[in-house]
Image (cartoon, grey):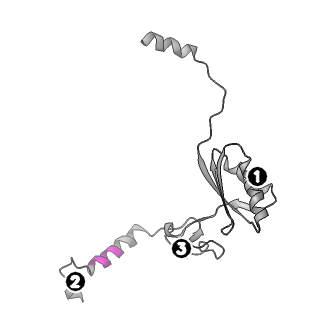
Amino acid sequence: MGALDYLSNFCTVTSTRSKRRPMQTVEIKVKMDCDGCERRVKNAVNTMRGVKSVEVNRKQSRVKVSGNVDPNKVLKRIKRTGKAAEFWPYIPQHLVYYPYADKVYDKRAPAGYVRNVVQAFPSSASAVQEERIISMFSDDNVNACSIM
């Protein structure tokens, strides 16, 4: 068995086929005004190779494409229809530590979404101080009533 495995390493044929792209979901913000715009964008993306599904939400100006596709090619194809398009810049509000910080809150964002920007998280020293204050007034603390 060992000799056959050793010899088979010399006889393998390497193929020049490119690897398949992984299944992914691409979200793009597209300015759409009417049913015609929506249909044009959907048809443009549906004709791409590797696309499994296309969801268009005109109210949120959002296009969600699932399949074995390159995100940059999807964006380029949508821009070719004449529509202003960019990658989806928003994330759900509950995932952000400070949703109303500068450059995070956006009036044009759909309800429940804020801009996806890098934020500073509170330092661990302030978290320790905050925990100390919270535990000072807890029911488990025997000295809590003497403080009050």
Q: Is residue 12 above or below residue 86?
A: above
Using the numbered discs, state the Cα–Cα distance from disc 3 to disc 1 in whole angstroms. 35 Å
For this view, does 147 lie left or right of residue 106?
left
Residue pointed to by mark 1: 44
Q: Is residue 133 something one can see in this rendering?
A: yes
Q: Based on the displayed image, in which of its 4 quarters is residue 132 positioned?
A: bottom left
Q: Amino acid at mark 3?
A: Pro
**Disc 2 crowd, CA 10 A, few/some/many (<14, 14-19, 20+):** few
Residue pointed to by mark 2: 144
Q: Is residue 129 above or below residue 10?
A: below
Near-viewer residue (139 or 70): 70
Locate the C terminus and report the quarter of the image it occupies: bottom left
Q: Which mark is residue 70?
A: none
Locate the N terminus and report the quarter of the image it occupies: top left
Q: Main secondary structure of the magenta part?
A: helix
Indicate whether residue 116 is drawn in magenta. Answer: no
- Residue furthest to the left in view is 142
- The region drawn magenta spans 130-135
Using the numbered discs, state the Cα–Cα distance from disc 1 to disc 2 in whole angstroms. 66 Å
Q: Amino acid at mark 2?
A: Ala
Near-viewer residue (68 or 47): 47
Q: Residue at x 51, y 11 (%)?
A: 7
User: Which element carries disc 2, helix, strand or loop?
Assistant: helix
Q: Nearer the viewer, mark 1 or mark 2?
A: 1
Q: Is residue 10 above or below residue 36?
A: above
For this view, does 125 lie left or right of residue 86?
left
Indicate whether residue 132 is drawn in magenta. Answer: yes
Q: Is residue 146 above or below residue 112?
A: below
Residue pointed to by mark 3: 99
Q: Residue at x 76, y 65 (%)?
A: 35
